[in-house]
Image: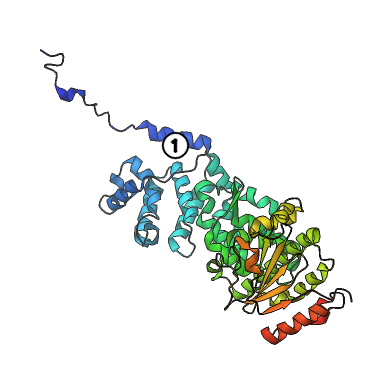
Amino acid sequence: MTLFSGINSFSFEPPDFGLPKLLPRQLEVIQSIFDVQPKEPNRGDLGALLAKLWKVPLDDWKQREVRQLPWLLNYGPRPHLIEQAENFSKVLSFLESNFKNSYLKYLIHIYLKHYHPQIPGFDLLRRFIHKHLISYNGKSPRLNRWKGFDILLFSPNGHRTTASKFEQLKADDVIAYIESLGFTGDLASCRFLKETIRTFLEKTVTQEVFYNKVQKTIALLEVNEQNVSRLRFTELDTVAASELIPKAGINAPDQIQDSLRSFFLRHLHDPRLPGGAPKWRKVDPTARKIFGQWIAKKDLEFFFNVVDKTAKDPHWQYRRKFWEACLPHIESTWVILGNSARRLVFQSSRDMQAHFKERRFGNLIGGSSEQSVFLIEMKGHVFVEWSNAGACRVFNKRTVPVTLGLKQYRTDDLRFAGYVARQLHHGAIRYKWQLELSVWIIKNLGIHIKQSEYRLYG
């Protein structure tokens, strides 16, 4: 006889103790104490409940199933339950007659996350929330916080009211205020906040307070996590570019240009280069043109700041003035740095370091380590300007492609004999080479550069 003889093998299976009844209740208590954000139930469970909704009367549902009812309002295929006027009214009537404060937290979460003011059901839900929230006198930190912001979040068209509140805040206070409203975790990218920011963007402001609006807009659109920036709503990046850049204008103050240029380079990249072009297609053409000139201006400033520290050409400032005169006609720019010049950048001003980090310019292989190169594209031609004394070469992109935006360039490739023009920088003080190059430009590109625009003195 074996040790287990006579013992029913089924006796080793675990007994069925049923589902715990107190655990969900205790979970609610813990959540109310520690202000834990509601978490959406398993989607498989929600699918089963949605199917049950059409078959079993709500009066016959178990309590734990009723607690998940708010999650069904915007779940599943369209039209969602909140879009079905008759069925949604029945659900709200049931919740009204069986109301528990614990439902309120879930309903608010759904309302803010999926907010859609054009759908009548959301206004019905808003009224339901408002009614019960103003009479709430419990201890939940989350509900009490929302009760304090009821006039913002749960008034008709609350996103507009909230956008007006953002107008009154200082730029440095925006992030803290967003968090105080409860827009964290799953609600950090909720639809209510997106509509609020969209409305904020559409508001017109005077030029005197425009800089403050720029800083607040960036604070609203961007989330910084562990020194990494990301967009809060990717759908609003092109909207922001189309709204803010033309408003700022081509001659915007440097601080506005710097803020907007830095922000859009981080998230949309350079519209004139292959990596950024697709992202800018939905942006207003005027905004694209202005932004391109902002970048060209900053690239030129960066390049000649490097030249200032490394140049062997005593008259480099005349070259800087000439290319500044060409800025309205420049379509694209790119800087290529030699090894010494690249190291020098990290010993330079914070502004230069910041622009280098944003642009991640190319490396120059071969030649002098102090040398740098500035590529300027105008009317299908690329002008190759060197930091040290030397000729400026012009290439036709159709016959000798010189691609902007690459990470590595060889010196020999940039001095290739296939150029269509070569301009020595002789007679700078007398504006000799400037006149010669401007004549070539007007003859071949149809661009007229006035002498008064590139004269360094008077």
Q: Position of residue 398 (x, y in %)?
A: 57, 78
In the shown orientation, is residue 216 left or right of residue 453? left
Within 10 Å of the Cα at label 1, are there few (<14), some (14-19), or many (20+) other Cα atoms? Answer: few
The residue under label 1 is which amino acid type?
Answer: Glu
Q: Is residue 187 above or below residue 359?
A: above
Quadrant where the N terminus sits is: top left
Is residue 253 something one can see in this rendering? Answer: yes
Q: Which residue lies at the image location 46% right of the left edge and 46% below the top edge?
A: 104
In the shown orientation, is residue 17 left or right of residue 333? left
Q: How is the image coloured?
A: rainbow
Q: Which residue lies at the image location 68% right of the left edge and 57% below the top edge?
A: 356
Residue position marked by numbered label 1 in the rendering: 28
Give the SS element for disc 1.
helix
User: Which residue is nearer to you in this view: 370 or 43?
Assistant: 370
Q: Position of residue 151 (x, y in %)?
A: 59, 54
Q: Which quadrant holds residue 378?
A: bottom right
User: Which residue is nearer to you in this view: 252 or 210?
Assistant: 252
Q: Position of residue 13 (x, y in %)?
A: 21, 26
Q: Which residue lies at the image location 60% right of the left edge and 55% below the top edge?
A: 222
In the shown orientation, is residue 275 left or right of residue 452? left
